[in-house]
Image (cartoon, rainbow, N blue to C red):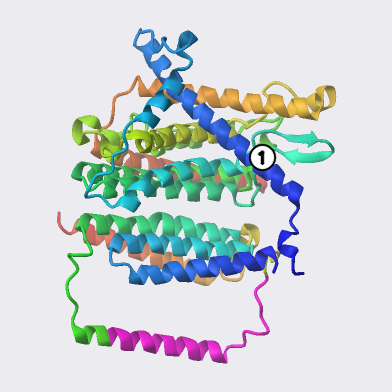
């Protein structure tokens, strides 16, 4: 028993490690190209051309941006709390990456006789885990804003934190209604129930809409980007940050956007299910691995649609005032979400009888 | 030493160490952050016992909501290590005596409790899974559960009443 600490299932460990590295790097690359897509979409909506110098169609622009952020001078304000000042962007990045652990990215693949599910971990409490990580996301903003030792940053951080914890409530209530329909908190079961059948958005249209609005608010995207309202608060909670620490904050926002788009596709739009095609028949005709690949691509296509929606809204709708934001959350969305929950519960009970 | 035992000792050291840091650190914001670390370690213990639901709810409710409010208050009051008032000597003594009393009671209670027979089920107990927990809460313990909800409701109503008083 002395050496049983090393008695892991090593293949299991390696498999999970490869999956984690793969998913993290994919999220990073997608977040990078989201910045490019955002500029191109903005340019398209405003009838401009957008970035077109670096590489063909400006496709190397994100690399140039990243280089610029890395090379800039790193300034840590003298009066700030040094350790917490560095911890802030780290936490923002960490919580943005952690959510991807429970998302099923595709079916199982057959790797030399070993069945590998394309999901890092399939825990019993998948949705609650996501909820827990999202509620941790507040700390990156709050710690960063406070450690900057700047009144504007502190105010922006408080705004951001109260916005995020307020919008968590309707988000949770919308998810409870979804859970009543699916009957499970496991992500794989939720997707499995939608495979080759009707998507959850048909059963929960209002729940989906509430979740969508809350996702906008949780990502601090326009029309809810009050933490960085530049006309009131200079630059928001990351005002004192420079170089890559600022880059991490901005990057975390894009990763959050990516992850919430994946979540919306997974929870409400069938996840990796290929629409209009029977996935079971596909496995028999083209094999397991190709099906898993196609499923993964389908999930990314659905996600790209939602990311486009995020950008479309950003360049179309102006920002709310702060009291409007809070009124919308507490006086409109929470009652709506409660009503949605009660009606769903009644219908589910009635159908089960 | 198996992985579970190793994790248990790691989490215990983390929990105790950060709990000590909560008391020791002079900056109240640091104290709150160490308290959050303590909650994480305790949630790790719950998950080690396969009580996933309690583990994650502990994080959502305590680390994710209540500690954020603590941070709000501390940040807005701008409490710093140097603005801390000098405490009375007698007050310190009273604190030591009352803390010692609590320790005495806890030691006495644990000494008489029969711990040896009931070791924690590590890794494979399934009573903490969400389905079993829900069944237990809504059948065997439904009355205490409902009474606790009424208590929370009254606390919420009370807060709203106090908040409305100024108008």
Main secondary-structure element of the magenta-colored stretch: helix
Is residue B130 depicted above or below A34 in this figure? below
Residue B4 vs residue A245, the one in the foreground: A245
Q: Position of residue A340 (x, y in %)?
A: 48, 41
Residue at figure coordinates x 74%, y 50% from the top left: A10
Residue B32 vs residue A25, the one in the foreground: A25
In this rendering, position of residue A246 left or right of residue A309: left
Q: Is residue B106 magenta?
A: yes
The reply to whether residue A58 is visible in this rendering is: yes
The quarter of the picture where the N terminus of chain B appears is: bottom right
In this rendering, position of residue A34 left or right of residue B10: left
Residue A105 image-quadrant placement? top right
Q: Position of residue A17 (x, y in %)?
A: 65, 43
Residue at figure coordinates x 25%, y 38% from the top left: A322
Q: What chain does mark 1 sit on?
A: A
Q: Position of residue B128 (x, y in %)?
A: 62, 64
The residue carrying mark 1 is A18
Q: Position of residue A200 (x, y in %)?
A: 60, 34
In this rendering, position of residue A290 left or right of residue B129: right
Q: Is residue B99 magenta?
A: yes
Residue B6 vs residue A176, the one in the foreground: B6
| Stretch in magenta | B94-121
Is residue A211 depicted above or below A58 in this figure? below
The reply to whether residue B126 is visible in this rendering is: no
């Amino acid at each position: 028993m002395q050496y049983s600490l090393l008695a892991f299932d090593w293949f299991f460990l390696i498999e999970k490690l490869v999956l984690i590295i793969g998913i993290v790097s994919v999220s990073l690359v997608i977040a990078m190209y989201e910045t490019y897509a955002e500029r191109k979409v903005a340019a398209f909506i405003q009838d401009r051309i957008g970035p077109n110098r670096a590489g063909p169609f400006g496709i190397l622009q994100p690399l140039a941006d990243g280089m610029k952020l890395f090379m800039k001078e790193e300034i840590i304000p003298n009066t700030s709390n040094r350790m917490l000042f560095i911890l802030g962007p780290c936490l923002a990045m960490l919580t943005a990456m952690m959510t991807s652990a429970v998302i099923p990215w595709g079916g199982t693949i057959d790797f030399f006789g070993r069945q590998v599910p394309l999901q890092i971990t399939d825990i019993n409490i998948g949705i609650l885990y996501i909820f827990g990580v999202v509620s941790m996301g507040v700390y990156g903003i709050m710690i960063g804003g406070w450690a900057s030792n700047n009144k504007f940053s502190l105010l922006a951080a408080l705004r951001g934190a109260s916005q995020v914890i307020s919008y968590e409530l309707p988000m949770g209530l919308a998810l409870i209604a979804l859970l009543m329909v699916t009957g499970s908190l496991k992500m794989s079961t939720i997707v499995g129930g939608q495979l080759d059948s009707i998507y959850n958005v048909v059963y929960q249209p209002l729940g989906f809409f509430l979740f969508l609005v809350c996702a906008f608010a949780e990502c601090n995207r326009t029309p809810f980007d009050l933490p960085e309202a530049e006309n009131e608060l200079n630059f928001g909670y990351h005002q004192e940050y420079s170089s890559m620490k600022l880059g991490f904050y901005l990057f975390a926002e894009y990763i959050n956007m990516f992850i919430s788009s994946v979540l919306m596709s997974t929870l409400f739009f069938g996840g990796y299910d290929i629409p209009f095609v029977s996935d079971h028949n596909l496995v028999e005709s083209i094999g397991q691995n190709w099906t898993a690949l196609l499923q993964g691509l389908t999930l990314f296509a659905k996600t790209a649609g939602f990311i486009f929606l995020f950008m479309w809204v950003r360049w179309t709708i102006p920002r709310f005032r702060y009291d409007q934001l809070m009124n919308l959350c507490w006086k409109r969305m929470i009652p709506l979400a409660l009503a949605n929950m009660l009606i769903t519960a009644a219908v589910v009970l009635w159908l089960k009888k | 030493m198996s992985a579970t035992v190793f994790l248990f000792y790691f989490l215990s050291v983390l929990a105790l160490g950060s709990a000590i840091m909560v008391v020791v650190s002079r900056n109240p914001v640091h104290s709150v952050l160490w308290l959050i670390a303590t909650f994480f370690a305790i949630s790790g213990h719950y998950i080690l016992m396969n009580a996933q639901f309690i583990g994650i709810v502990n994080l959502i409710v305590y680390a994710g909501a209540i500690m954020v409010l603590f941070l709000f208050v501390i940040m807005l009051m701008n409490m710093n290590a140097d603005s801390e008032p000098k405490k009375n000597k007698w007050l310190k003594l009273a604190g030591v005596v009352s803390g010692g009393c609590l320790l005495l009671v806890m030691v006495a209670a644990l000494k008489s409790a029969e711990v040896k027979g009931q070791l924690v089920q590590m890794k494979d107990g399934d009573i903490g899974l969400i389905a079993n927990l829900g069944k237990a809460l809504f059948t065997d313990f439904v009355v205490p559960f409902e009474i606790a909800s009424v208590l929370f409701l009254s606390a919420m109503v009370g807060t709203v009443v106090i908040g409305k008083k100024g108008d």
